[in-house]
Amino acid sequence: MQILFTVGHVVLGLFFLMMGMMHFMKMKDMTAYASMKGLPMPSLSVAMTGMVLMIGGAGVLFQFALVWSYGALVAFLVSAAFLMHNFWAARDAQMKMNDMVNFQKNLALAAAILMLITLQL
């Protein structure tokens, strides 16, 4: 069972690390999206959330400061769900569906990470 847990940690850590890197690799597009969603200082917001994702992902990947790494990722996921994927405000049907899927995904990932936190306490 330990090997499965380790594989899960590696995949989860890499997922968030890569998502953080994408914030910088696709800075222009991510900033435009954040601006469209009404985030203040969209460029700074994208950079800061990219760093949170990379640091949190690296912490999970290398199993360093796990409670803090998990906590940072949960904070990002919950805030992104409500600020960026507010499907209830979307007028376009396709955008509403995309936002609903991402809202649910973010909350499900946050819930799973909260369960991982309990293993560290």
Image (spheres, rainbow, N blue to C red):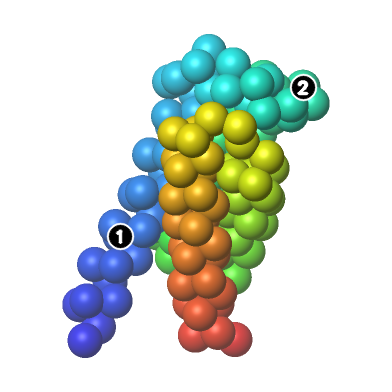
Q: Position of residue 85 (x, y in %)?
A: 59, 43
Would you say 86 lies left or right of 27 here? right
Image location (x, y in percent) of residue 29: 50, 17
Give the residue drawn at x 51%, y 80%.
115
Residue 36: image tag:
none
Report the quarter where the C terminus lies: bottom right
* Left/right of residue 109 with respect to residue 69 in the rendered view: left
**With 10 as the anchor, is 102 left or right in this view?**
right
Q: Amino acid at mark 1?
A: Val
Q: Would residue 42 be seen by someone viewing this image from the given angle?
A: yes
Q: Of the residues under marks 2 and 1, which one precedes in the sequence? A: 1
Q: Does any portion of residue 66 appear in the rendered image?
A: no
Between 104 and 56, which is closer to the camera in this rendering? 104
**In which quadrant is the N terminus drawn?**
bottom left
Front-most of residues 93 and 60: 93
Residue at the image position 20 percent from the left and 77 percent from the top: 3
Q: CA distance from mark 2 to mark 1?
A: 32 Å
Is disc 1 placed on a helix, strand or loop? helix
Nearest the eye: 113 or 82: 82
Residue at the image point whose x is 74% and y is 26% from the top: 38
Name, please, the residue furthest toward the right.
40
Q: How many marks?
A: 2
Instruction: Give the number of the disc on residue 41.
Output: 2
Answer with the quarter of the image where residue 87 lies: top right
What's the amino acid at mark 2? Met
Is residue 25 shown above or below 78? above
**Is disc 2 placed on a helix, strand or loop?**
loop
**Vertical relation: 21 (above or below) 60:** above
| Numbered badge on residue 10 | 1
Residue at coordinates 22% horizontally, 76% vertically from top-left?
Answer: 4
- Contact between marks 2 and 1 (CB within 8 A): the answer is no
User: Closer to the camera: disc 2 or disc 1?
Assistant: 2
